[in-house]
Amino acid sequence: MNAPTPKPALTVALIQDQVAEYYRVKVAEIRAHRRARKAARPRQVAMYLAATLLPARSFPWLGREFGRDRTTVAYAVTRVARLMDHDSDLAREVDLLRTRLLAMSAPDALRELAGAVAEDFAAALRHAVMAAAESDPAGFLHRAGAVFATQPTEETPPCAS
């Protein structure tokens, strides 16, 4: 029996390659300093995917990988995210590319992404708890005490409110 072929690690080069293939442009066009319209959208999508799938990488580092600076990466990420809210075709394209890249890449990429999502969720939860505590301290303590005092039973699942 043959050993399974190891999956490639998720890298900026892999993201650039897959985006270029999907949009039928050359990787060199995505990395080029020119602002050719043909490559602008694929470049922005590739930057968005790199920033979201490789959360441990900084915008300056990603900018160097694309031959750009950090502000260009930040603009691309913001622009694609905003466009996806209004353009369902673009949202589907990005989703398809993300799924393809995650399926191609090593499990480490999924663990890194899951860790980043968990950290973001924990930070958002801390922020929400702190905001609730600051806006109504007495009510917050009362509700928090009620939550921790209630023991789940067989009739009440732990997640029920």
Image (cartoon, grey):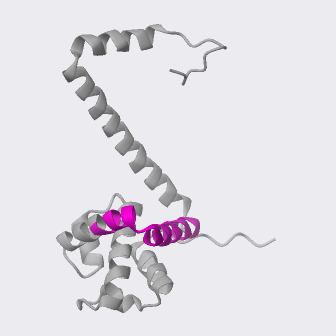
Q: Residue at x 45, y 82 (%)?
A: 17
Q: Nearer the viewer, residue 118 or 156?
A: 156
Q: What secondary structure prevails in the magenta region?
A: helix
Position of the N terminus, as image quadrant, is: bottom right
Number of marks in the image? Answer: 0
47 over 32 or under it: above or below: above
Q: Nearer the viewer, residue 95 or 1?
A: 95
Q: Residue at x 38, y 41 (%)?
A: 121
Q: Is residue 86 magenta?
A: yes
Q: Residue furthest right?
A: 1
Residue 2 lies, in percent from the top left, at 77, 73
User: Based on the displayed image, in which of its 4 quarters is residue 16 positioned?
Assistant: bottom left
Residue 158 lies, in percent from the top left, at 56, 21
Q: Residue at x 43, y 14 (%)?
A: 147
> What segment carries the magenta color?
79-104
On screen, residue 127 versus residue 49, left or right, reads left
Residue 115 lies, in percent from the top left, at 43, 48
Q: Is residue 98 magenta?
A: yes
